[in-house]
Image: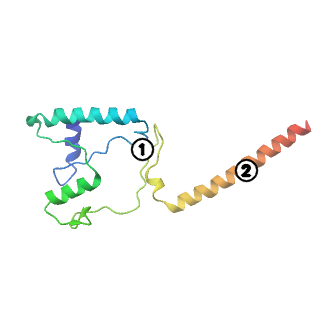
Amino acid sequence: MILDQYRQKAQLYKNDMLLVPLEDDFRYDKPDEWDNQFNNYQRLFDHINGRPELNAKLQFVTLKDFFNAVAQRSQLEPEDDFLPKDYPVLRGDFFTYSDRDDHYWSGYFSSRPFHKSLDRITEYHLRAGEIVVSLAMAYVRKLV
């Protein structure tokens, strides 16, 4: 099933290589988890790589390794050993987010400076209001 998912995702790319990030920002915070994830994926890779009829090769790589391999496979000259010169690049302000489960907004923390500034100012005023209400409640309780 995972190989089928990888193949479907690969249809979106111009080359025959696919980068699949494993897990997310909330993983690998314990040594056991790191070992278990690595060992499980390595077993999966060994199984798939050991079956030539599946016509797939899976391996662990860094981003630099991946983009250099794409450049080499595309027969393009790597630019700064990272991106090929003639390879399309998507640029802009990305606001990726998730409103379920962990509720993290990954793009928000690397972009949208106006919204981050507005949030800081709003949080400052909200916190000041909370402090004033706490002090007022303490004063009222003291009088009663």
**Percent x, y for residue 44?**
22, 33
Mark 2 and mark 1 lie on one chain; the one further toward the N terminus is 1
* Nearer-the-camera pick, 114 or 142: 142
Amino acid type indicated by mark 1: Asp
Residue that extends furthest to the right in the rendered view of this protein: 143
The residue shown at (22%, 67%) is 85
Which one is closest to the eye, mark 2 or mark 1?
Answer: 1
* Residue 67 is at least partly visible in this image: yes
49 lies left or right of 9: left
Identify the secondary structure beneath mark 1. loop
Can residue 1 be seen in the rendering of this structure? Answer: no
Count residues near mark 2 (Cα–Cα under 10 Å), then give few for <14, some for 14-19, many for 20+: few
Residue 23, given in percent of the width and then of the height, sits at 35, 40
Identity of the residue drawn at 77% across and 45% down: 133
Circle count:
2
In the visual, does 2 lie left or right of 130? left
Mark 1: few, some, or many residues within 10 Å (few <14, many ≥20)? Answer: few
At horizontal 19% and vertical 50% (from top left) the residue drawn is 17
Q: Which residue is mark 2?
A: 129
The residue identified by callout 1 is 25
Quadrant position of residue 78: bottom left
Q: Element under label 2?
A: helix
User: Is the residue 39 above or below the residue 18 in the image?
Assistant: above
Q: Position of residue 43 (x, y in %)?
A: 23, 32
Query: Between residues 48 and 33, which one lies in front from this camera angle?
Result: 33
